[in-house]
Image: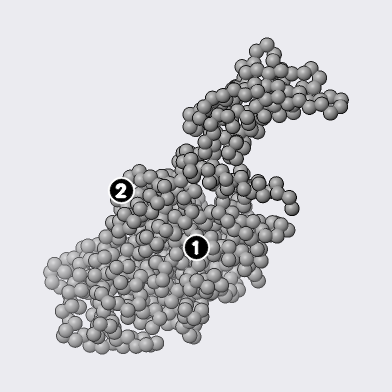
Amino acid sequence: MVGISKGIRAIALVGPAGAGKTSLAEALLHAAGAIDRQGSVAAGSSVGDASAEARARGGSTELNLMRFDWQGDGFVLVDAPGGAGFAADADLAVASADLALVVIDPDPARAPLAEPTLRRLEAMGVPHALFVNKIDQAHGRIEDLLIALKPMSAAPFVARQIPIMTGDVVTGFVDLALERAYHYRPGAASEQVPIDDALRAQEAAARQTMLEQLADHDDALLEQLLSDEVPDLDLVFGDLGRETRDGLVVPVLFGSATDGHGIRRLLKMLRHDAPAPDRAAVRLGVDRAAALVLKISHGSAIGRLAIARLFEGPLAEGADLFAADGRAARAGALFTLQGAATAKVGRAEAGDIVGIAKLDMARAGELIGIGAPPPEFLLPVDPPVANCVRAVAAENQKDEVRLSTALNRLAEEDPGLHWGQDGESRETLLRGINDEHVAVALDRLKRRYGVAVSVRQPGVAYRESIRKACSQRGRHKKQSGGHGQFGDVTVEIRPLDRGEGFRFEDRITGGAVPRQWIPAVEQGARDAVARGPLGFPVVDVAVTLVDGAFHSVDSSELAFRTAGRLAVAEALAAAAPYLLEPVAHVTIHAPGSATSRIGSAVASRRGQMLGMAPEDGWSRWDAIEVLVPESELHGLEGELRSLSQGMARYEAHFDHLAEVSARLAEGIVQRRAEPAQRGRQPA
């Protein structure tokens, strides 16, 4: 068991895009005295979202780390981007956090936006609380918001505050545990005010509800409530903290990050109720001194940093570090991170998140032992599916090596990015979670590394096959002085069942083709099916060598390979070739309110509905199974998001090849032929 009693605590800020997570981080830093002036995301003056990509988009595009001290306790904020495309960059940090704050806005109609976040935190086992931001813009009741949220969480939402309304505006709150009322003051701590008679009954009812929810997990409190005793305040606060740390309840607080309202009350909750780092270590199965690498960062001045969370400490420069497979290294210089700024430190304490220089062996998601090898470790999260693919190429051929280096670094920094060479098309493919994710990666590629690239949709892996059997002779004869070339074969071809691939057989008798040349004929046949008469690889066809002739002097391996290729190529053209396209099995996860619209969108993409069922464990969500041609997947993710308030997601996997209609096939074949025709034109 890790022997940490306290340590620096990591608080993850998570939730839908646009809820104000970065603004809340700024407000917490300012209230705690870590910064002199509260910056603004809109004005581009915040500590977080300092990258050029985030500034340009007005929202987080990567993980941001910030730190502050509050009344003697140290905290690291993990500001996770809300966009689905950037989830992979922050997932490890969120999974290793001590407490997550789910930041939402107060509109009950937008409550479903929080469900993906709430479900993911439940799956990770991370204790969490809810902060309702922008409370000054609330037009509905907090009760309505909690009712809308209730089906989205296994643990109950426990309101720790109720709002004080002046007209239609929230001007303060009542702390239900303390039974004290406070009025907001811009830029300052809230002012305590008496609870008036009009508010007293509402406060009493709300407090009773809170106590009853806590009593579900505390027999002593339940007994006091049944006896109509006034619960001891220490017991109430003890239950709030314990049940929050154990994930039994989800406390709810509210305020306004931009105005600083409710921020100090939130800081007090974090100080008293956030678990110590040893709880996260136990959850992750870390039972000794170790550092979990959350991400890799390539900074222009410092170079490569392995950003890691420490479980048990301290860690100092020069410490011996070990990977699970025995690789060893010494820790380089240590750096704390405050947004884009770094500061060198001599040592790091338990629970802290720091950048470790010169740790080239470490990769994101790897557990590194401090002083000894680490325990076995399994990643606590599954990476999101990379649905968006782009073909990229350096505009200047001399930049090809720089492009590979840059793509390697981008993929190392962001686990959601992948790249590689397509074996068939020879294209360099960049894969990301969605269109926005890939667009940001391309922006970074140009800004950081100065590599100009052309970007286009990758080619679809079309195939072709044949409808009928036929026989064809192929003869290759060439005489140019000295030994000539001679090969003569007759082949029969026939279609096979879908999925059987390519088959070569020979029925040669009487030595019409000597045995040593038959493999060359097979290779020639394979050459021919690599690019069929429509311009694509041929599948599900059998080639049988039935006859031939040879010359004792001029026959050769090359001659019979050429003859085999000519025979099969001509046979394919005569065997009624037709085009096949890859079809993907797609599983779409979406709120039920968007299901009918998504069905229409799938139909417009030549999709076929297979079935639909309620999403297991989710409230009013559906899992929709469809078949969609891979050529129609481009733009699907963006369309699904637009139809579902940004919530729908999908996974796609190759399912089968299907025949393309004659009308569509004609256009595909024509487009395939155009580049070749242009290449034959004179300069």
Image height check: is 42 above or below 246? below
Q: Place residue 418 in its image quadrant.
A: bottom right
Residue 613 badge: 2
Task: Please tell me how many numbered marks the rendered image carries.
Answer: 2
Residue 577, percent from left and from top: 54, 33
Task: Check disc 2: other Cα within 10 Å, few if <14, some if 14-19, many if 20+.
Answer: few
The N terminus lies in quadrant: bottom left
Colour scheme of the rendered structure: one colour
- Residue ID at (46%, 83%): 38
Task: Check disc 1: other Cα within 10 Å, few if <14, some if 14-19, many if 20+.
Answer: some
Identify the element where label 2 is drawn.
strand
Q: Place residue 595 in its image quadrant.
A: bottom left
In depth, the one of 609 and 419 nearer the eye is 609
Identify the element where label 1 is drawn.
helix
In depth, the one of 612 and 567 nearer the eye is 567
Image height check: is 145 above or below 588? below
Q: Mark 1 or mark 2: which comes first in sequence?
A: 1
Q: Which residue is the extreme one toward the right? A: 482
Q: Is residue 239 among what the camera can see?
A: no
Residue 245, percent from left and from top: 35, 65
- Residue ID at (47%, 77%): 41
Q: Amino acid at mark 1?
A: Glu
Residue denoted by label 1: 436
